[in-house]
Structures are given as structure tokens and as C-alpha cells.
Image (tube, rainbow, N blue to C red):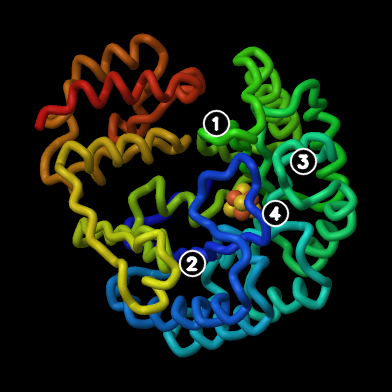
Amino acid sequence: MVVLLNNFSGIYFHIPFCPKKCLYCDFFSVSGCPQETLKRYGKSLFNEAHYRLGELSGTKIVSVYFGGGSPTSMNEDFFRNFAGFAVKSGINLEDCEVTVEVNPADRSEKWIRNLKDCGINRVSIGVQAFDDLVLAGTGRRTTVADMRKNIPVFAKYVDNVSCDIIYGLGKNRDINQELMQIFELAPFRHVSAYRYSRPERENAPELLDEDETLRQEAEIRNFLQKRGFSRYEISNYSLPGFESRHNMLYWTCGSWLGIGAGAASFIRKTGVSSRYADDIEAFVSGEGLSSVKLTLKEKIEEFLLMGLRVKVGINLNDFKELFGKDFFELISEKAVLDLVSNGLLEFGENKKILKCTERGSDFLNAVLIKLFDVIRC
Ligand code: SF4
């Protein structure tokens, strides 16, 4: 398991463009923007990141992540400009995990090779399903044929390949069979498996019933565990040493700069969170950034929410460093011990770590509600 130290940090670039909106998507992204807008936006991203880099001083940047939206909307020049930005800003990409989220429908071999040339060493492929009927029902542009053609090309140029799968939608899916076919295309080292939650939209796919959803989830878990993957976070599985650094920074309270419309940042040493408005033009004009002021209770809730999602759990020394008081001064010890005796939480490393058991991870919401209720501040 990759455990990141407190002084590690990352940069997240948000690319809020998608050629077409999927029916189930709630992320901030827009479709139909002219190339000129994408160009101006891309330029602003690197200028803004360079300008704000001082906020990460005293930390070591270990992760850069391009998420979206669809980073595959951006052209080759955008990634060349990124490589130039890294040099100008003194970021050594060889020390970083540099991830791009990609849609397997979108790009040529030349575009993919350019990623590698520009320092990208990890791709996260939005597979979601390996069944054309399910894909069509979600409004995704990708087909099984696109994936058969392009996933091996991504794997040819980038060693560290991850994929996203969505479950809880698509009746009568044989997810085991889907995964077998996906794994024939590339040596995946990481899989994110997201549970579908239906957005309030007329044409969004139907939610499956709970039993069927849990059956699909169990199929994914069994498939991956048989292949040596470990579930290191509620929705994420990896081979040893291939946990996503970007994810781990979020869940272990590292610092990160989120750059782009709708992106959020958190700087550990100052405890300041900030966020850009969901507005592309405002971002390009250098506006729309605001600080987010959380109350102490909200900060503790965030800490618990992030930390208990991961297998390593929360470090009680980190809690003291962040909040200035011992964990049990601010959270009822009796309530925590009750959750331990019910087999939902457990201590590790001489009571310095508190984490969910496997069963606790399945009932994380209930665990969090109980803990949120007993925060004393
Ligand atoms: S590609 Fe991703 S971000 Fe874009 S609409 Fe589909 S799910 Fe949303």
C-alpha cells in the first residue's frame, strides 16, 4: 500500500469539456465548445498553476492528474504545453505519477504516443461497461469495438493502466464476463468500481434493485481479488503498490491544488480550501476563485469521511496535528468503542490508527452518521 506522507502534494487539472453529455453524469462539463475556447482554457490552466504553485511550497509534488470532463478533448499541443509548464515550474515529472483520464473512443495512436512523450505515465480509461446495450443505455459514445481497438494502444505506450467500471445499472449483466474481456486487452493494475446513483434527469438509466446491485458489486470484488487486487478504498482496487497517488492525497489529507473551472484545492499547512466557480469564461478571465470556510465540525466530518474510506484508515496523530486536540477530546470514545465491539471499526498500530473493518466499509454511511453525531464542538 502506498502511504503518502503529510508533506506530499499534487496538482489536479480539470478539463470540463465532453463531446457529448452521458445520461448519468452529474460532473461539471459542457459540450459543443469551439476549439478556440479549449485552447484559451488550456493556456489559462498552466498560467494559473504556475501562479499558484507557491501554495505548495515545503511539499513534494508526487502526483499530477488530468480529470474531467474528458481530457481526451484536448489536442496534442495542450500536453506539450504541460511538459513545458513542468520544466518552467521545476516539477520533476519522473518523480510524479502523471495521470490522464481517457475515453477509449476518442483518439489516434499518434495522440496516445504523444502522451508518453509529454511525461504522462498513467492512464485511467473510462470503460464503465463492456456491453454495447449497457453502454448505449448510458448515452456513452464508446462502443466495445472502440475499446478493443484502443485499449491495447494505451497499454502499448503507458505501463500503468487503470479503468473505471460502473455497476448498479444494466439488467442481466454478466460483469464477470465483461471483466474477463476487458482484462484480455491490457494488464490493468488498478480498477475504480463506482456504484451508480441515479441523477434527477428524465432519460437517466434506471437504478437496479439493491440485491442485483450487490450481486454485481460482489462479482467485481471476487474477480479482482482472485487476481491479487486489494480493495484499498471503498470504490478502488489495485495491485500492491499501484494505489492511485491522486486518490491517496485526498484520503490522507495531503495538499493539492485543483486548477480549472469547478476544481477545488486544499492546503494542509494552512487548512485553507478554495474552489473555482463552475464557469469556464470566469476561469479564463482569472475570476471565480473563492475560499471555502468550513466550521471545525465540518472539517472533522471531512477528515472522517475521507480517512475511513481507505484501508489504512485515519492516523490519530494526524488528527491532533490538524485540529490541535486529541481525537477522543473531540469525538466520544464510548461511541467509537461501540462501533469497535460491533465489528465495524478496528484499531491498528498501538491505537494510533482507526479504520473500518471489511464489514464497516460495507456500512460506511451508518458508521459516519454515528460518528458525526458524537463530535463535540
Ligand atoms: S465522459 Fe465523463 S464527464 Fe463527460 S459526460 Fe460522460 S461521464 Fe460525464
Taking the image as shown, residue 32 lies to the left or right of residue 90, namely: right
Marks 3 and 4, how far apart at CA: 14 Å
Q: Residue at x 67, y 22 (%)?
A: 218
Q: Residue at x 70, y 56 (%)?
A: 161
Farthest residue toward the front?
A: 202
Marks 4 and 1, how far apart at CA: 20 Å
Q: Amino acid at mark 2?
A: Phe
Q: Is residue 363 visible?
A: yes
Q: Amino acid at mark 1?
A: Ser
The residue that label 2 is drawn on is: 13
Q: Is residue 366 above or below residue 230?
A: above
- Across and down, in percent, residue 109 comes to 83, 72
Q: Are marks 2 and 3 in contact (CB under 8 Å)?
A: no
The local secondary structure at tag 3 comes to helix
Density class for disc 1 (Cα within 10 Å; few <14, some 14-19, many ≥20) is some
In the rendered image, which quarter contains the C terminus? top left
Number of the label disc, if any, that sits on residue 197: 1
Q: Is residue 97 above or below residue 202?
A: below
Which picture quadrant has residue 180? top right
Marks 1 and 2, how far apart at CA: 25 Å
The residue that label 4 is drawn on is: 125
The first of marks 1 and 2 along the sequence is 2
The local secondary structure at tag 4 comes to strand
Taking the image as shown, residue 88 lies to the left or right of residue 349, namely: right
The local secondary structure at tag 1 comes to loop
The first of marks 2 and 3 along the sequence is 2
Q: Which is in the foreground here, disc 4 or disc 1? A: 1
The residue that label 3 is drawn on is: 135
Q: Are marks 3 and 4 in contact (CB under 8 Å)?
A: no
